[in-house]
Amino acid sequence: MTFDSSRWWRGAAIISPVLVVVASFFMRPNLFGESQAPVALLLVFGAGAAAFIDDGGIRRSPNFWYFWRVPLWVAMAYVSVLAVELVNGQELDFIGWLKGITLALVTLSGVVVVLAQEDRRVLVGKLFVLVIVALSVSYIVTLAVWAVLGVGAGRLGEIFTGAGFRPWPFYFPFTPTIGIRALPFDITLPRFTGLGREPGWMAMYAAFTYFIAPRLGWRHWSIRAIIVVALLGTFSTAGFILFVVVVAVDRIVRVTPRMITTFRRLGTIARAGLVGLFVLCLVGVSWLLVKAPVFGLEAKLTEDRYSSGDRWSATLAGIKALFSTPLSGGNPAEVAPGLSIIASIAPYGVLFALCVILAFVMSGLSHESFKEAAAPVAIVFLTLLVAQPPLDSTWAYVCVLMALAVATPRMIPVLELGSAAR
């Protein structure tokens, strides 16, 4: 993937990616998204306009138009919510629904226009990686301050992120947190929320960044190490488990024919040793997912029963609705409805869940370089499937677009606005 440096003097080529990444802070489900989502809409609308100016017309390729399937299926998901509420005779918050679909559709459409051009999509990806790495470095600095000056040192104020309906502290230099976490050996650490509304989202962004950074040419081990520290600092069990699973699967899928040939040429004892090592690694990963202190499933069920209990109840409600009332949904008063794609079946019906799934599936099935985007897209999809709400989580879908755009080969302009009439 090449970068045309001759375009850098054109301000619009830089402005639109910068506006998109700045908008990420104000977009749901991120730091200021619960209260300032319209700001994100205005910023992305401006980014799309700047991108249109930068192009001097419309740039079209199969992949560019293919990206429109994401906002299309997200819009269909909102329509299905409206249909279920009307059919069930539920009290309809039409203004809230209209605001949600407008924010999602306009924002995603603007992002698609910005990502249509190669140097812009590379710049969006790199700026987003820089944001996540910068926030992660801030968290590491906060840990160092706490280690030297004590727990709670460097507190600068509070931020209302929408998590827990109360403001949460942030620390020097700029580390948003949601409380603290006590560990063995009298260790107390801040629970990192980073760009997200709550730690689970930041865990997803960290894992996502871990995979797209190498696709952008940033392969140094230190970048990945910083990102992993930030992911662990969220203390998100779902984020940790999904990260480990996707890393393991990604490594298995990337086994090359040359490696297979080398394996076949080895002696019987060497091959048996490698197979045994592979099985041992699988056993170790399985143990890690269940038994790991702080992050394992057992630790989560023991130490944070409120969060895990809500998600489990919501998931069971979604499964129950799938087999009882799939089209109309179940009881909208179920505990914590809509906490995941599975749980969303209860309040919104199976058509909503299907539309969200199709936003991922249809955007990736025919993508010519989907193998390069599969791991980061899988992180987002699995997070929404089991752990985070898919409705009004616009930046999660932007991440899907970003992963696909970064993996897209160089586009060739086919149609310019000035030559359309000819």
Image (cartoon, rainbow, N blue to C red):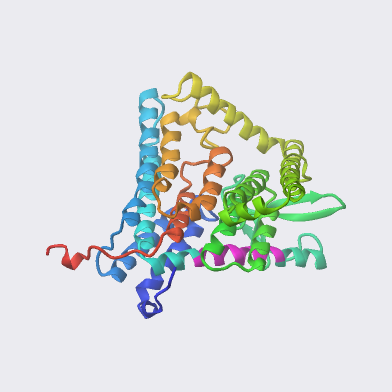
Image position, residue 52 (x, y; %): 29, 65
**Magenta residues (range):** 126-140
Q: Quadrant of residue 362?
A: top left
Q: Which residue lies at the image location 54% right of the left edge and 22% below the top edge?
A: 320
Query: Hey, which residue is sitting farthest top in the picture?
Result: 324
Q: Nearer the viewer, residue 192 or 126?
A: 126
What residue is at 45 percent from the left and 39 percent from the top? 357
Q: Is residue 92 left or right of residue 174?
A: left
Q: Is residue 67 magenta?
A: no
Residue 251 visible to the viewer: yes
Q: If the image is split into quadrants, where does the C terminus sit? A: bottom left
Q: Residue 42: image x %, image y %?
A: 38, 59
Which residue is farthest left? Answer: 422
- Magenta-drawn stretch, dominant element (helix, strand or loop): helix
Residue at x 75%, y 48% (from the top left corner): 277
Q: Position of residue 400 (x, y in %)?
A: 46, 51
Residue 160 showing in the rendered view: no
Task: State which quarter of the image contains the N terminus.
Answer: bottom left
Lateral position of residue 117 relative to residue 378, left or right: left
56 relative to 185, above or below? below
